[in-house]
Amino acid sequence: MNPMRPVLIALSQSTRARRLMTHYGPVRKLARRFIAGETLDEAIAVVKGLNQSGIQATLNQLGENVVSPQDVRCAAEEYQRLVQRIAQETLQSSISVKPTHLGLDLGEDFCYSQLRTIVRTAWQFDLTVEVDMEGSAYTQATLNIVHRLLDDYRNVRVALQAYLYRTQEDLKRLIMRGGSVRLCKGAYDEPSTIAWRRKEDVDASYACLMLMMLSEQALQNGFYPALATHDHNLILLAEREAIRRNIAKNQFEFQMLYGVRRDWQRRLARDGYRVRVYVPYGTQWYPYFMRRLAERPANVLFITRALIDG
């Protein structure tokens, strides 16, 4: 594991570091590599460019750990507008939400009511709502909400994290329901009591879970796999498995982050695979950006040099 990762994750939660770094020019410039912009119009322009390249998107208004009911309702209203804008612009895009942006810290029922309204609106426009997965303290509550939503709506996809020991059982349940999962490795600093910490172990877990998602049983149940990885070895494994099982290229999709592995995004799209890029936008970009740095420690050197030169 990258030794800087726990430090960067801790900094992502620091109010003092947030104030310092969000007002520093070189940091803001680097953040634009991973953030589409601070406004919806900027994000829409990015999505249009991706769509023109044959790549779909999922739009996310950045924000998390909102504890004011009024602010939560404002965020929910923004997501309603986002859904309508996607429909008006005929974009190939889903939306992604973080449960703590919609008040999960205020209780499951409160968050569920906000998210259900968004899901219902998205259903009317035939759009998918992707429910992001945050730190392990929120895993069970997030899944509780998702399963409640799946009782009434099928346009819900939840993210699962391969580094958590519990994910295999969580995935089995969703496969049985014929739902949809966005499988990622995991971006939070979790203890070894609940998560694999060595890269080799996380990769092995991801591969095992991915093969479950591409299994005959899963696809027969109507399960839809979304494989969120930039690891070329795992991408190649998925391609080989799809060929071996004669799985059509429209029966699953690859997902990647905005600003990461653009070469592989284009290659997979050219080869006829469904590719979806996560496009975040908004003023609350700092925690997300720091988690991306934790995944790419080479960028820390860039910031260090900028701070010294500045």
Image: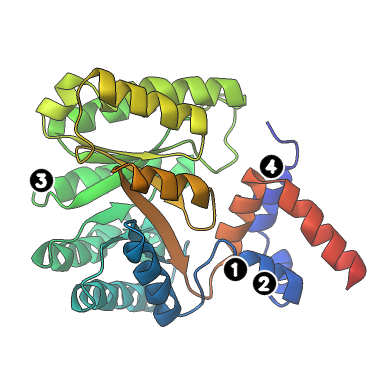
Q: Dot 3 corresponds to which residue?
A: 151
Q: Dot 2 corresponds to which residue?
A: 28
Point out the residue furthest to the front here: 270
Asked if the residue at tag 2 contacts the one at tag 3, i.e. Cβ–Cβ closer than 8 Å, the answer is no
Report the amino acid beneath label 1.
Arg
For marks 3 and 2, give the one nearer the viewer. 2
Asked if the residue at tag 2 contacts the one at tag 1, i.e. Cβ–Cβ closer than 8 Å, the answer is yes
Secondary structure beneath label 4: helix
Give the crowd class for mark 1: few <14, some 14-19, many >=20 residues within 10 Å.
some
151 or 271, nearer to the observer: 271
Badge number at residue 32: 1
Report the amino acid beneath label 3.
Asp
90 or 181, nearer to the observer: 90
Q: Dot 4 corresponds to which residue?
A: 5
- Mark 1 and mark 2: span between their CA atoms? 7 Å
Name the residue located 36 percent from the left edge and 27 percent from the top edge. 238
Name the residue located 22 percent from the left edge and 33 percent from the top edge. 174
Task: Please report whichever mark, 3 or 4, sits nearer to the chain's N-terminal start.
Answer: 4
